[in-house]
Image: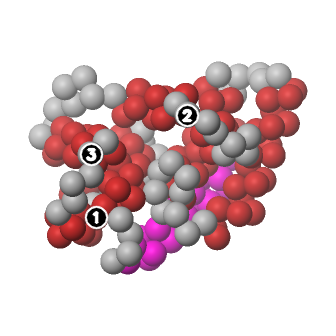
Amino acid sequence: MPKRLLDKDEGLLVRIVNHNLLYEPFNSDLGLFKGRMGTILFFFHYARYTGKTLYADFAEKLLDDIYEDITEEVTTCQLCEIGWGILYLLQQGFVEGDADEILKVIDHRIHLQHSRHTGMTEDYLSFRFALANKKLNGYSSSGLLRKLISSGDMEELSWRNGLKIIWG
């Protein structure tokens, strides 16, 4: 049962959902911060919050679309953001599967690009290796997601603002 939100927060949350349902399929950014991966995380959480599978179905469709849209133009940073998001979804029980099998394409692309990116790359690799070794050693994917939500400016109708409202 979802917690009771203030009417203004509930109204804003509905606007965030409607905005992202309409516009997100056309977003060419596949990453976490301003892309489809972030919206996918939001809709899985929103489905759990409302108890309505319609939103999880939408998130699954967006996730399938991401895999179809991974081309050579997708940056290493975006690949790491997608990989991190998938690991988060697996860890939180939103999706099921073998991380090694699911992330094979992403791991291969990252390895090929030999990027010097840090930040999200390090977060993804830390999470990936911790899960591969079956040791999380205090790594908190939820903590990182909460940090992402609270950092920097965000648009009123962004997925980050939606999670901020849901999580209070």
Please determine whether, in this image, residue 65 is positioned above or below residue 50. below
User: Relative to 86, is 40 on the left or the right?
Assistant: right
Q: Position of residue 33 (x, y in %)?
A: 51, 48
Please identify the quarter of the rendering in which residue 83 is found: bottom left
**Nearer-N-terminus badge (1/2):** 1
At mark 1, the secondary structure is helix
Q: Position of residue 156 (x, y in %)?
A: 73, 40
Q: Position of residue 64 (x, y in %)?
A: 48, 68
Tell me the distance, in whole angstroms, between the alpha carbons under discs 1 and 2. 27 Å
- 61 is within the stretch colored magenta: yes
Mark 3 is surrounded, within 10 Å at the Cα level, by few (under 14), some (14 to 19) or many (20 or more) other residues, namely few
What residue is pinned by disc 2?
152
Please determine whether, in this image, residue 50 is positioned above or below residue 146. below
What residue is pinned by disc 1?
106
Magenta stretch? 52-71
Residue drawn where x is 87% and y is 27% of the image: 7
Q: How many marks?
A: 3
**Residue 129 circle label:** none
**Nearer-N-terminus badge (2/3):** 3
Residue drawn where x is 71% and y is 59% of the image: 21
Residue drawn where x is 35% and y is 65% of the image: 75
Tell me the distance, in whole angstroms, between the alpha carbons under discs 1 and 3. 17 Å
Residue drawn where x is 61% and y is 26% of the image: 167
What residue is pinned by disc 3?
118
At mark 2, the secondary structure is loop
Please identify the quarter of the rendering in which residue 27 is found: bottom right
Which is in the foreground here, disc 1 or disc 3?
A: 3
Q: Observer-nearest residue: 42 or 27? A: 27
Tell me the distance, in whole angstroms, between the alpha carbons under discs 2 and 3. 18 Å
Please determine whether, in this image, residue 67 is positioned above or below residue 47. below
